[in-house]
Amino acid sequence: MVLPLTSPRICALLASALVWLGGILGVGMLRPAIAQAAGAAAVTYFSWYDNASPGMQADNIHVVNPGISTVSVTISLPGATSISYQLDGHAAKYSAFPFGTRGGPVTVTAGGAVVTSKRTVYQGSLTEIPGLAGTAAVSDGYFPWFDKASAGMLADNVHLFNPGPGGAAGQVQVLGQSPMSFNLLQGQATYMTYPSGVIGGPIHITTSSGAVIVTKRTVYKASMTEVAVTPAASAASTVYFNWYDSGPWGFSNDNVHVVNPNAGTLNVKVTVGGQSKTVPVSGGQGTYVSFPGLTAGPVLVTAQAPVLASQRFLYNGELTEVAGFTAADETLETWIPWYDHQSPGMVDDIHLLNPGGSAVTVTMTLPGQSQATINVGSGQDSYFHWPSTCPRAVRCWCRRAPSSTTRRRPRSCSPCRTSTRAIHCRARRPRSRWPLPTAGSTSRKTRS
């Protein structure tokens, strides 16, 4: 049984999980609309599935049932045999289509609201993206950067899916480049890219009819990262990132990208670790800033009008991209489908950011482990991990303080080899390089 909230007081929390696997860092993000129990959806989508291309080692779909009743789950992909099972309340399960399967979209349909994510291993690197409900479809959205020119950049593909109802038509355009047009019937998916040599940003996705679910999959050397589009409507005058790292431990090129979706020029301030930089950003354009040698958190992006922001960085030569948080992403409670601090080479840290004006008490539960409670001060970031913990799921919730947030799976320990549990904690993950299970699935009900 999942424990109830520890306090009726309202609180806000931004969280992420940073994961290392064999010297490679991964980052992924679960938005509250997907990760919160209250925001789970009965139907979610992934724009692309690939368990066939060279270098793809695993592509696993995780499902968490935050409710108390058993639900039916069906995972479908055009041209593939559907996967169906029953999922107990407060339980998690992962599945994969057979090796050789590729295409899109993937549709996860459940008999109740569930939380979903997809964890992909490419050449030993790991990226994770949450399942997106039909309400995540956009008519106006941005990615901060496109790159098929820099050394090592092998692919940068924009994937689009029309969940309906009706058709969806529009265009994808990198600033300064000719637009690419699309026209999708309900249920259709496609992907688009520019030729080699194109670099710049932002990428602007607009529709003249309907709305589309959009992600971008970037291959850099032996790594891949996937990120969902940021809707223009999600722009905010304050944007957060849990952590910044351009220190001596393998991190490099930690760039904070900012996009100004407004008509006029804005002065945007980026602050981290007591250092600040202010840059002008023209309307409809973007830029980026960095702080070489600095390791600190949180990162605060502020402007006099709403902006969009994301973070792109290299760790040991591996590229990761993650979108920033806004006040709309604050949450009381969240689920993370997978946690592993025990498999060979794994380090799995859960970062918690409190953007509020008073301290927050955060409680995290992981089946089979002691409940963890930590305090996060106002405007502060903190992180936590359970020592030597087998793969499974986690839950987090918080309350205000009284004075006022691969084909092959690495080996795991024998007792946990077949157990999957959901992490419950509002999460933004640095592209998680977590060990992903092999094709097939396993589940186990969580304990209180």
Image (cartoon, helix red, strand yellow):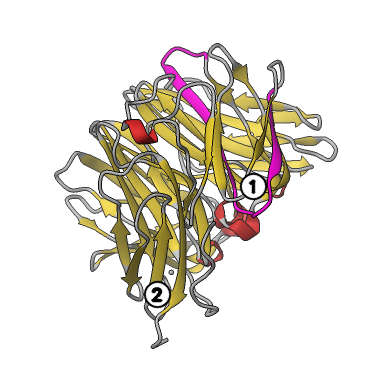
Where disc 2 sits, the SS reads strand
Asked whether 263 or 82 is in front, the reply is: 82
Q: Earlier in the sequence, mark 2 or mark 1?
A: 1
- Taking the image as drawn, is residue 354 in sight? no
279 left or right, relative to 292: right
- At a point 85% along the width and 37% down the height, the residue shown is 166
- At a point 60% along the width and 57% down the height, the residue shown is 37
| Residue 235 x %, y % | 56, 60
Asked whether 337 or 123 is in front, the reply is: 337
- Taking the image as drawn, is residue 372 in sight? yes
| Residue 3 x %, y % | 51, 63
Residue 102, above or below 289? above
| Residue 229 x %, y % | 57, 44
Residue 23, above or below 372? above
- At a point 52% along the width and 70% down the height, the residue shown is 5
Q: Which residue is mark 2?
A: 360
Depth check, mark 2 against mark 1: the one in front is 1
